Image (spheres, coloured by chain):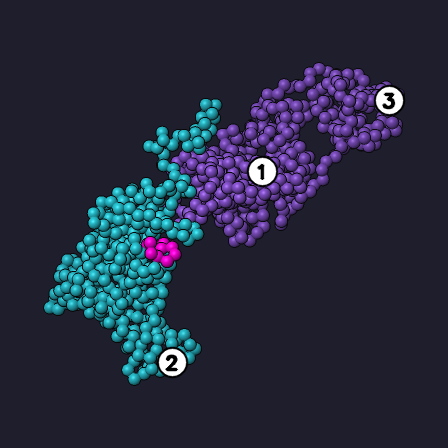
Chain colours: A purple, B cyan
Amino acid sequence: MARKSQGAGAAPHPRKIPRFDGPLTPEALGEVFRDCVDFTRRPVALEGLGELTLCYLGGMVRMERVSDYVLRPLAEDAQLRACGSMARAMARMEEGALYNLGVARRDTLDQAAADLVAGWCLLFFPGERAALSFFTGTEEKRSVSAPAGETVLKGARDGFVESVRTNTSIVRRHLKAPELRIKEQTVGRQSLTLVDVLYLEGVTDPGLVEQLWDKLADMDVDGVFSTGGIEEYIVPAHRTPFPLVQYTERSDRFCAGLCEGRVGLLIDGIPLGYLTPAVLGNFLQAPQDKSNSWLLATALTLLRYGCMLLTLFLPALYVAMVTFHQEMIPTRLALSIIAAKQDVPFRSAFEVIVLLLAFEILQEAGLRLPQSIGQTVSIIGGLVVGSAAVEAKIISPAVLIVVAIAGIAGYTMPSQELAGALRLWRFLLAVLASAAGLFGAVMGAAALVVHLAGLESFGVPYLTPFAVSAGAQAREHVFLRRPLPQIKQRPAALRPRNRRKQR
Amino acid sequence: MRRGAVLLPAAALLLLSGCAAPSLTGLLPYAREIEDMELVRTLGVDAAEEGVTVTAAAGGADGETGTASAGADTVSAAVLAMQVQGESYLYFGHVGQLLLGEDLARRGVEEALDYTLRDVEMRLETALYLVRDGTAAEALEGAEGSAPDRLEALADGTGLSADTMTRSVKDVLADLADRGASFVPALAADGALTAAGYGILKDGALAAWAEGEAAKGINLILGRVDADVVDAAPPGQPPAALRVVGARSLVRPVYENGALAGLRVECTVEANLAEGPSAVEEDRRQALEAALAEIERARIQAALDLASAQDADYLGLRRAAALLAPWRKTALLDGAGMGELTLTARVEAKIQRSYHADG
C-alpha cells in the first residue's frame, strides 16, 4: 500500500497486508476492479516497441492531464520510440520523459490499486513486472469558505474543507514553521481514509503524538465517515457523554491549538480539525475570545460558566424547591408559583421532565428539517404550543420559563458536544431532585464531579486546572482571560517541550 | 451494565409516579407540592382560658388574606388542629411576622417563642410584634387589606419612623437569655395596624409599654434614627424643623468612690435644617443645636427611666457599658440592678447643613 503506516516503530496494522496478492498485471488489476464501470483500461501503441496498457478510474483522474501529460508524449516523443526496448522506455519515462509531476514505480498489486483509487493512472509495459504510476488526479472539491458551524466575527475565514490535502495546505499557510510535522495513516478497511496527524516538533510532547499515532494504528474499522468514526476509537468516549476531543472548522483555532502544544488531526472527507488533548475549560472558550478585549472575554467566559451551571441545575433546583424546600423560595415568588400552578393537574417533577423532553423533541425536529421549516417548527412549538399549553392549564408558566431559561443557557456553550452532555445530565439531576430534593441534586452534582474527575484526555485530567494544579505560574485562560502579553507560557498540563511561548 | 441500564430508568419512573413515596419515606425527604399548600405569612398567638389560640393569616398573590384559627393547650397542638380544618396544607416556612396578644404577653411569651425556636418550618428571623390593647386574632382579622402586606410595609418603613423598629424572635430570645429583659415593637389592633411603641419584657412577660418620647428614646439609644423631624424652638428665636438623620450612642459607666453608681448614655445626634430661617449664623445654629439636644435628651431619659422603674436592662446598657470598660465587665454585668443605678443622658446635637443653598 502506498500510504500505509509511515511512523517509525508503529505497531503492525491488523488489516490484511497485502490486500491483493499476486503479480502486477493489467489483467490482475482488472480482476481487482471487476464489475467497476469506472475502471478504464486502454491500450496505447508505442510505435516500434509494442503496445502499452493505460489504466485509470474514470472520475478520479483529470482527463486533460492524462491526455497532455501521458498520452501526448507517448505519441509524439521520438526519443521514446528510439529506446529500443520496453525496459529502457520505462526507465526513461520514470526519469522524466513524461511531463507528469508525480511518477512512481509500482511493483505490487496493492500499491497499484490504491494509486488508482487516489487518482493516479497506471502504465503497464509488456514483459515488465512493474508499472509506472502517474498522478493525474482530479482536484474537484469544495472551495475554501467561511466555517458554517462556527461564526467568525473577527478572524480567518478559511474554514476546513473535505479534502485533507487542502486542509494541510491551509494549516501550512497559517503555521509556516518548517517544524510543523504532518504524518499520515490510512484508516478504514473499506474507506481507506487518510488521517493526518499534525504537531509542532520541539513544542508538542512526543509522547502525546506517539499515543495518538498508536491509537490510530490500532484502529481496524470498515470506514471513517463521521466525526465519531475516529473520536470514539482514540478516547474512552463510551464512558462519558462529555467530549474528550475538541473539533473545529476554524483553521486559526486549529493552528492556535497546535502552537499551544496540542496534537491536531485532519481526516479526509471531514471538514473539521481535531485537537487533543481537550479538557473541560477548552470547551467553554470561544474562538473569538482572543479577538475580544480581555475584560470582555473574561466577562463572557464567566457568563458561560454561569450558564453552564444554570442549564445543568435550574430544572433540578426548581423541582427541589417547589416539591421539597418551599422555604427557599422568596415568599412573593412562592405565591406567584402557587397562583400559576392552580388547576395544573401534574406534579412539578413530571411537568419539568416532560417539558424538557418536549424541548429536546422540538430541537431535534428543528435540526432535522430544512432551515426555513425548522425555524417554523421551533416557533410553532415554542410559542403556539407553549402558550396554548399554559392557557389550557396543562403546564404552569413557571415551568415553561424555567425550562426555557435552562435551554437558552445551554445554547451559550461554544461546544455543541458539551451542551449535549449537559442536557443529558440535566435530565438525571432533575430526576434525582424529584426523588430527594436538594439532597438528590447535590448527590447528582457530586456524582458529576466524580465522573468528570475520573476522565482523562490523552493522560490530561479533564478537570485541569480545577482539580489538578496547573502550577503556581498558571496563567492560561480558564475564568480569567489575561491580556495576551502576560501569558508567557504554554499550559503545563500539555507537557510541551518548550513551555515559553513569548518573550 | 445492562441490568443497570434497565434499573435506572425503572427507578426513575417509579419515583416519578409517586408510588414509591410511602416505602421510601424513611430514606428520602418528604415531597409536598407547592400548589397544595397555603403559605402562612403571619401567625398570631393569643391567650385563651385554657391554653392558647393560634390565628394564621395566609396571603395570596392577589393580596387577599385568609385566616384560620384554632385553640388548644399548646401552640403545637393548636397548629395541628388548624391543619385539619382546610383542604390545603398550612405551610409555616414563610411566616414573616409573629403577633402576640397583650394577654398572652402578660402571661409570658416564652411558650410562643419556644415554638418558633423548635418548629422545623418556623424561622428565628420572624419579626415579633405585641398587640397593644387587643389580641393577635383581632389584629389579623380586622386588618384593612392584607395583614401580612401591611406588616411587611411597616417593617420596610421603619427607617422613616423614629419610634419603632423590627425585632426578630432570635433577637428577643437572645436578649431574654442574656439579661432577662427585652423589648418588642407593639401594634395597635386597629385596621391599619399602626405602630404603638414598644412592649418591655421582663422575665419572659410583658412588664410595661414604652410609648411616645420613651419609644423615640429607645431608637436614639440604639442609633436607629434615619429620619425623624423635630420641631426646635430656641428661646427668642424663630422655630425650625430639624431632620434628624443619625444618632450614635455609647454607654459610659459612672463610678463613685470606686463603686458603680450609674450609667450615662452619651449620644451624638446629627440633623439637617429642614424648614425655617437659615442657620448660617453661629449663634442661631448653636441655639438650634442646644434645643435639639435638650429634646433628644428628654427622650433618652424617658427610656432610661423605664429601665429604672422596671429594674430591667431591656436595652442592654450594661453590656454596652462593658465594651468601654471590659476590665470591669463582671462587675458591670452582675452588679447592682438597674433600679439601683442612676441612669442619665447627655446629648450633643450637630446641625450639618440645610436643604437650601443659603445654608
Q: Is residue B78 left or right of residue A367?
A: left
Residue appearing at x 41%, y 50% in the figure: B60
Give, as a single range, the part of the protein colored magenta: B140-148
Which mark is on residue A362? Answer: 1
In the rendered image of this protein, does residue A429 appear above or below residue A188? below
Q: Name the amino acid type tagged 3.
A: Ala
Secondary structure of the residue carrying numbered label 1: helix
- What is the chain letter for disc 2? B
- What is the chain letter for disc 3? A
Front residue of A398 and A262:
A398
Which mark is on residue B303? Answer: none
Which mark is on residue A45? Answer: 3
Label 2 sits on residue: B278
- What is the chain letter for disc 1? A
Tag 2: Cα neighbours inside 10 Å, few (<14), some, or many (≥20)? some
Residue A318 percent coordinates (x, y): 44, 42
Q: Name the amino acid type tagged 2.
A: Ser
Q: Are marks 1 and 2 in contact (CB under 8 Å)?
A: no
Residue B195 percent coordinates (x, y): 31, 62
Q: Is residue A99 left or right of residue A322?
A: right
Q: Judge whether residue A334 is colored magenta.
A: no
Residue appearing at x 53%, y 36% in the figure: A357
For marks 3 and 1, the one nearer the N-term is: 3
Mark 1 or mark 2, whichever is nearer to me: 1
Tag 1: Cα neighbours inside 10 Å, few (<14), some, or many (≥20)? some
Residue appearing at x 84%, y 21% in the figure: A43
Q: Alpha-carbon distance for marks 1 and 2?
A: 71 Å
Q: Judge whether residue B145 is colored magenta.
A: yes
